[in-house]
Amino acid sequence: MLLKKYKLDTDFFKNNENKRNSKILSSNLFTLKKYKSDKLFSRFSVVVSTKISKKATERNKIKRIVYKFIKEKNIYITPGNDFVFIAKKEIEKKIKKEIIQDLIKLLAI
């Protein structure tokens, strides 16, 4: 799991200034919103809606896969970005390997 300092808190989403400076990328399973930041490290958030799954365990499983990927690839080390991963409906039918492949393609690693 990622340390708390690498995760975006809810105050980030309440601040309207952040919404203006975003770059949006999209893949089959995720929409990625990338914001500029003045931090010395990157921060992340994963949003999995109840429209994808009503079960919290399934939503949390998707979040754990994404956070583990971020930690293993050391993506949080790159400075000055805030990332919001928004899962799409198609993700519920995918296995872990397919989710990771989609993340690699989305982040162009």
Image (cartoon, rainbow, N blue to C red):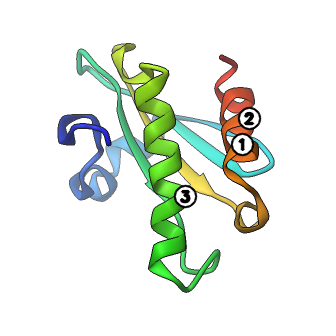
For disc 3, the marked residue is 62
Which residue type does callout 1 highlight?
Lys
Front one among 25 and 16: 25
Q: Is residue 74 above or below residue 84?
A: above
Residue at (60% x, 79% y) in the render: 53
Q: Which residue carries the number 1 mark?
A: 97
Residue 31: give x, y in percent of width and height: 65, 48
What amino acid type should be assigned to the residue bearing mark 2?
A: Gln
Q: Is residue 19 above or below residue 87?
A: above
**Spatial separation of the CA atoms under disc 2 and disc 1:** 6 Å
Q: Residues within 10 Å of mark 1 (few under 14, many from 20)?
A: few
Q: CA distance from mark 3 to mark 1?
A: 12 Å
Identify the mark nearer the N-term, 3 or 1.
3
Mark 2 surroundings within 10 Å by alpha-carbon count, few (fewer than 14), some (14 through 19), many (20 or more): few
Q: Residue at the bottom extreme? A: 54
Residue drawn where x is 76% and y is 45% of the image = 98
Q: Is residue 57 positioned above or below 95 on the image?
A: below
- Residue 86 lies, in percent from the top left, at 57, 54
Q: Are marks 2 and 1 in contact (CB under 8 Å)?
A: yes
Q: Amino acid at mark 3?
A: Ile
The residue that label 2 is drawn on is 101
Spot occupied by residue 43 in the image (x, y as percentages of width and height): 33, 34
x then y, percent, for residue 65: 52, 48
